[in-house]
Amino acid sequence: MSSPNTTFSLEGRGLKLDTSSDTNPHTAPLSSSSTYTHINLSGNTFGAPFCSALAPLLSAQTSLTSINLADIFTSRLLSEIPPALSSLLTSLLPLQHLQTIDLSDNAFGLKTQAPLVDFLKQHIPLRHLILNNNGLGPEAGTHIADALSDLADRKTEAIQKGNKDVPNLETVVCGRNRLETGSMKAWSRTFTKHSHVKVIKMVQNGIRQPGIEMLLREGLKGCEALEVLDLQDNTFTHIGAEALASILPGWKKLREVGVGDSLLGRKRGMGMLCDALGKGENKALRVLRLQYNEINSRGIARLLKLAEGGSLPNLRRVELNGNKFAEEDEGVERLRTLLESRREDAREGGEEGEWGLDEFSDLEEEDSDIEEEEEAEAEDSEAEEEKEDEKEREKKAEGIVRDAEEEEGRNVSQKEDEEVDVLAEKMGKTEMM
């Protein structure tokens, strides 16, 4: 006897569903069954009347554990989104098994974020939140973070009242959202309260070094269960590198670190990172993403020494493209050989991108020692200037908000983020405990 289908999907059909009459031809299975555990409505565009008619069908799915609502408002006016979103999210609040929600590629700026904020404050079962490419900006990003802080309080209250099934918030994906430094105080509070978080991905958010330092030292320091941290394409310099280095040894379960394209600094930043990893407290680490950080052959040599010496016995993937060394560098070749031998010894499958080194398509020529010293001095000077500039901005306004309302009118890019898509798919297909 075949097992019943537990997934309902309209994924990627490009449907434009406007009215309540549009529900019948496309959502009939939801009317005839209430046993779905996963629903995927991504890649279509829904109007407010359709969402209102769809809402009772969703609220009847009492077994639902995950829902994908990514990219469901393309071409809609900003005024259409709040009522449509409110209908959908309000219908999900009663679903006590719904732990995963993906709302990526929808415009949730200041004018449209209120229904999402209300939902996040209240949905105690939430375990995995995916918000990628939503055009939030620092002010709306602050509202989202504050809502998650309120959620932490509600989870605590529920536990104190005897609810033993309250899950921790384990996954927060909030990338490509212009969160900037101005929202980092709020996000730091969020992660202080959700200290059991396991996966944090906040790539490409325009966060400058003071914000990175605040997030790490004030927010993530106590997240001892952290397994994946991806802060790529933000600005570290040696200020952020120092903060990261001071906290790394406390994350003993860490499996993946992404700090590519972050001005980590080839000398001081890489040195501090290697010093921290050299303490041997991150033996679970498997993946290091370090592209475009001006790392030279000396940095590669230090990393190789750690991998060969036992500090990183489980390291299997290192991404180094866009740095400053020769592809035929001896340290690079030895690191490649080491990682390949580990894959052979492990006898594990997996995709090609899960092991070894990445492709070197964009390496730069290594600088001379004099150039290194001059650029290191310039790096220090720029970092100090940035700190002073940040202090001035904070004096002028609480929270850095730049043309937030004008940004509301811009379409959220529909470019796919492959890693986030893979993560969302895994979350949707995995039975949550």
Image: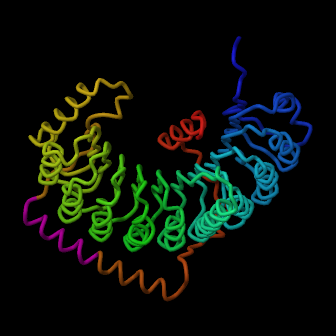
Q: Would residue 64 appear left or right of 138 to someone viewing this image?
A: right
Please tell me whether residue 81 is drawn above or below residue 239 in the rendered image. Answer: above
Residue at 22%, 41% (x, y): give it. 313
> Main SS type for the magenta part?
helix
Q: Quadrant of the C terminus?
A: top right
In the rendered image, residue 373 lying in the magenta stretch gets the answer yes
Dividing the picture into quadrants, the one containing residue 284 is: top left
Name the residue nearer the viewer: 129 or 13.
129
**Residue 154 falls inside the magenta stretch:** no
**160 sits to left or right of 173:** right
Q: Nearer the viewer, residue 430 or 289?
A: 430
Locate residue 377: give its quadrant. Answer: bottom left
260 with respect to 146 (left or right): left
Q: Position of residue 349 (x, y in %)?
A: 36, 24
Q: Residue furthest top?
A: 1
Which contiguous range is marked in magenta? Answer: 368-382
Looking at the image, residue 255 lies above or below residue 151: above
Residue at (76% x, 55% y) in the render:
81
> What x and y, as percent, mark residue 136?
60, 62
The image shows residue 21, relative to residue 96, as above or below, that is above
**Residue 171 located left or right of residue 390:** right
